[in-house]
Image (spheres, grey):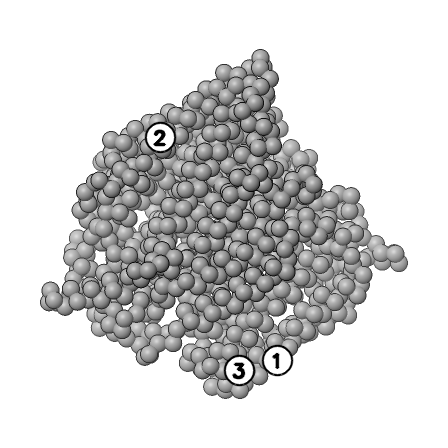
Amino acid sequence: MSEQLRKEQEERLERVWASPPGWRYWSAVNNTEVGRWYTLTAFGFFLFAGALALLVRAQLAVPDNTLIPAPLYNQLFTLHGTAMMFLFAVPIFEAVAILLLPTMLAARDLPFPRLSAFGYWCFLIGGVFVCGSIFFNAAPDGGWFMYPPLTTDPKLSGIGADIWLLGLSFIEVASIAAAVELIVGVLKCRPPGMRINTIPLYCWYVLIVGGMILFAFPPLIAGDILFELERMADWPFFDPARGGDPLLWQHLFWIFGHPEVYIIFLPSIALMAMLVPTFARRKIIGYSWIVLAAVGTGFLSFGLWVHHMFTTGLPAISLGFFSAASEAVAIPTGVQIFVFIATMLAGRVVFTVPMLFAAGSLAIFVIGGLTGVMVAIAPFDWQAHDSYFVVAHLHYVLIGGMLLPLLAGAYYYVPLVTGKKLSDRLGKWVFWLMFAGFNIGFMPMHFTGLRGMPRRVFTYPSGIGWDWLNLVSTLGAFIFATGVLLFAWDLLWGIRKRETVSRNPWNAGTLEWLNPLPGPDFGVRSVPEVASRYPLWDQPDLPREVDEGRWYLPDAEEGQRETMVTSVLDSHPIQCLRVPGNSFMPMICAILIGASFIATTYHLYWTALGFGIAGMFGIMTWLWRGTAMIPEKEEKMVGRGLTLPLYISGHRSVGWWAMFITMFGDMTAFASLVFSYFYYWTIHEVFPPLGPDGAPMGPGLLWPAVAFGLLALAWGAMLWARARNTAGSAMGLRLGLGIGVLAALGSGAAMLWAPWQAGLAPTTHVYPAAVWVLLIWAALHLALGVVMQGYCMARSLAGKLTTRWDIDIHNVVLYWHFAAITGLVTLAVTALFPLLA
């Protein structure tokens, strides 16, 4: 290839992927750029939450302190925990993954950059809304776990609980959106030759944690729905006087809350899995073992939630089961740590600042793990529960298992993002200040807790053995904060004065270091074919070949953003995907939907409905203009004699996978609502309760049967519409869609009419409230299905949905499979179960 041709190709690529000069950061839709802002925003919330923690420690430094009044103190510790867990720990993983994956997978971009941008704006708006509440004395004050009944009474908790519930529900939308992007990106956007068993370990962790998000966050969303319905509509899900139970919230919260600890921990371990082989100067030992251990950790993490509830009076068999599971999770966690130690022992370790943080994290995390085994034993937990011993344990796990590995990753990967290194000299100061400050701050809390100091108290009397321990803890917190501020200064200001480093400054073996530094906003110059887990070590000519455009997609001849789609297991090329460019629509849609959540918080329901409808129209506009774009030709030559289609549909397309993964998360939320229904059955002698006629209450059989018949008709009509479209009949497609719309509307109306005509008043008892929630959930899914059917109809009439261009109908039919399952289970539970109970 001539030098002139190579330069022309590079200029074309840079021009195609460049952000517009005006409003660059508002409209940019590129995962590299989104990842940068996502990361900086999450770090900003970390600094905010840390400042709140320092105020808490200042209040507890001496006994009988009057620095901070009790109401404000409650808001401080609640918002500290909320911001750290929801606005930093999980978002920083997603932000870093969005930033790193395109280069790590040698892809131009992940498949849904607009979805990433939408998630970022949801995260930013929700985070500012929740954190900003403290400046108006309206922050939540019931703890980051928001236990009822204190928080379900608006008179006791004020508007802060609504801000927490609706603000975090909106933020969870961002988390799930990012999880979909990351899972599909790892499965479908790998370079040729990178089989599923050769992907970088970081990608394995992204897959596992993304799957965990889909199963952990929806139960909290389901709980938020029940919680907000009790606060706003007086539906008694947690009111024992009307059949509810406050413990249900604890179950739903900790089904989310304990896996979240591993959702936080595993991505940081993933960073360790990338830098340890680099500085040990050898490939990871036990690749398969660490993958299996990570999968095992993720799986077991969902069986531990009850160890947060040992003091609630559970049966002994439950205590034994969950205690054993809580101890068992130490096994796969230990395997991962021993793999790192074995790799370092077998290699020749280069002790750098990243390795210093990595070693420190292992030391702190092991201490946290040992105290975790202690609180997993029920008799000990009964003594230490809700004491400062648990505060110490939690922070040893989170700081050692998440923050210090994250900082190791920051010192390792900052050159990849900025082209410049952080200071080694300052880095050592940062480490020792944080390491010493943390241990000085949190080690005494073990003894404070064992001496009986409860959590969440804003002051304490002198002379009971807590005074000097709290003073030492406060001193340690400020030493730790000094290290954090020194890191922030170096990252945001000090780095600007340093020179650009050369390509691959650490001599790493994985593909994220393939580009020259600073790298382009698009992933790689051309997509290479790889043959090992450490291609930069095993294919030394690869950087030169990529620079010269000798691999796939070396150019942007048609002036379009493109990336390569490959098969899930073997990574065979199957499509050249057209990636949508810059747009304001993700930001606009996030603002509209965020406004809907915020208006609901202040009980402005009609305003919220208006913003919600506007947001829905915005999303439809976004999809119409930027998704499933019809190319100007069927296929194109992508290099090295390979020709790929520009458009595919069905299970091979990234859109189908995104719908499939999203609906799995949706089904998890639905399963949590069904779990809630049967939870009430387990705690009541008679459930459903008996009506005035002595028979079990229920919606009857007639209208649920009508709803079921119409639901089956709507689902069948969609299958028929897809078949007719495949056969080339546009009229058949439209007829099927029309029948499906009418049947779905009829089914949803019958579902809502069933409890209404049966006189089930949701404010009188938890049973009718649970029935209403399930039926409303199913009816709303049918309504969303109708919107999708209308979208397909409009696409067909506009000539954008045809036999050849049919991705929309395939994805909508996939949605209807899940909607039909939801409706069928709902009708069976609400109509048939009362007859069998």
Relative height, residue 590 to residue 558 (above, below): above
For residue 239, what is the image quadrant? Answer: top right
Identify which amino acid the numbered label 1 is placed on.
Ile
Whether residue 833 appears in this view of the structure is yes
Element carrying mark 1: helix
**What's the CA distance linking mark 2 and mark 1?**
64 Å
Q: Is residue 542 left or right of residue 759?
A: left
Cβ atoms under marks 3 and 2 closer than 8 Å? no
Q: Position of residue 447 (x, y in %)?
A: 52, 20
Label 3 vs 2, first from the N-terminus = 2
The amino acid type, in three-letter code, at marker 2 is Gly
Are dots 2 and 1 in contact, CB under 8 Å?
no
| Residue 483's disc number | 2
Relative horizontal placement of residue 682, taking residue 792 as reference (left or right):
right
Residue 739 badge:
1
Q: Please identify the residue farthest to the right as the structure is shown.
A: 693
* Pick the front one: 834 or 239: 239
Q: How far apart are labels 3 and 2 at the CA level?
A: 63 Å
